Image: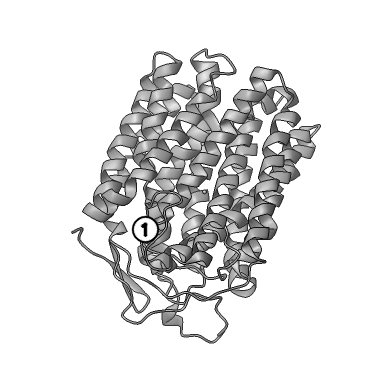
Amino acid sequence: MSGSGTTSGGASGGAVGAPIGAGGGAGGDAADRRARLVVTAFYLVQGMCFAGLLAQVPTLQHDLGISDGTLTLILLLVPVVAGVGSVLAGALAPRVGSARLLHVCGPLVALAVLGAGLAPTVTVLYPVVAAVGLLLGLVDASMNMQGVEVEQRYGRSLLNSFHGAWSVGGILGSLAAVLAHSLGWSLAAGLGLVAAVGVAVDLVATAASGGGAPRPAERQAVPGLVLPEQPVAVAPRQDAGASRAARPPWGPLVLVGLAVTIVYVADSATSNWSTKYIQDALGAAANVAPLGLAAYLGCQLLGRLAADRQVNRFGPVVPVAVGGVVGAAGLAAVTLAPGPWVAVVGFGLTGLGLSVVVPLSFSVAGRLDPDGTGIAVARVNLFNYVGFVVGAGLIGGVAELLSMRLAFAVPALLALGVIALAPAFKVAARDGVASPAAAP
């Protein structure tokens, strides 16, 4: 699932979807444009590191002689520990600022990914993977806090563009695995390339940010969501005795979070098992198998780049509902695929359909956090890991008991639940309290 050195630690946001790099709108001065580029860079690196590691899972399994059952446990460890990282980010961000948290932890993710490639045994791999998970959770939460805040400054949809940058990074990470296989590189060399690029980009972005000094921002009107009647400054919360009524409400966040959970069950199935499924079950070559993940991320990017106009035209409910249908159809194609290329197309449809759900969820969370603490963003981010845990365990378990082909039928059915939950994405926020509203 970036940071801005010129933004504060708090975060609130609205609807999503402007093209990457587009300027203009409220908050579009030079400092805000620089903040947007820095945020984009961290999203890109996070996606590259995450996908770069997952695309190498079959190689990691082969090199260390890991059984499918042990692999399932390892894959479950990442989101469980990442959930701890997300909770930790929610506690730290109001105190130290999400920008500073992101600038410290971002490069460490890349180094931890390299550490996984250097692990000589499964025993050593477990603590390394735990470190990867903790850092991923810290960065996922803090970069979305930053993304929400920059969106507020611009006063228009941006979060889809940031998540689109994550997808670009994911494509680069998966293609790095293709390159490593094609050139006969070792696992450490392949992940070393990803880590080196990730650290370099993060450090350059941090330097360009000017050190992460907080800067307050006013909430701007964003299509599809209603703002509080009074502008709210976005800054780390300093008043420990603030009113409890101002804290983000759990009810609306749970509805949105359930949709996020479903999406991440599908995302977990694709990220953790697509390469192995295409290679082992469908008989693809090692340099073809990662293309399923690349297609998923590529179509996810296309969906996010196109989402802004759709959200502005129809509101958030219709794109989320239609996305659930398309995502379910894509996973059905994966389940029924007679060969690797049909599965690649199916994974592409899955990414295209479900692409809008997660960015919109963080926009809703930002609007439900009137003090800009980032707590609501961290809460929604937890559903990310719930879905990933359920997805990793469920797909691995069904694959072990039945077959990997049938395992993909589970997220195909669950994806239909996104349609029922789509109305929760139309939220009116007033005085920190939200309620579902009808789509325009």
Q: Quadrant of residue 272?
A: top right
Residue 438 placement (x, y as % from top left) = 20, 61
Q: Residue at x 74, y 43 (%)?
A: 128
Residue 358 relative to residue 388: left or right: left
Residue 169 placement (x, y as % from top left) = 55, 41
Front residue of 184 and 78: 184
Residue 407 placement (x, y as % from top left) = 45, 28
Q: Kindly identify the amino acid type of the residue bearing the numbered disc 1.
A: Ser
Q: Residue at x 78, y 35 (%)?
A: 119
Q: Is residue 394 visible?
A: no
Q: Quadrant of residue 120?
A: top right
Front residue of 226 and 409: 226
Front residue of 39 and 274: 39
Q: Residue at x 57, y 31 (%)?
A: 174
Q: Which residue is mark 1?
A: 157
Q: Residue at x 45, y 34 (%)?
A: 298
Residue 320 placement (x, y as % from top left) = 30, 48
Residue farthest along the front direction in this orientation: 30
Circle 1 — which element? Answer: loop
Disc 1: CA contacts within 10 A as few (<14), some (14-19) or many (>=20) = many
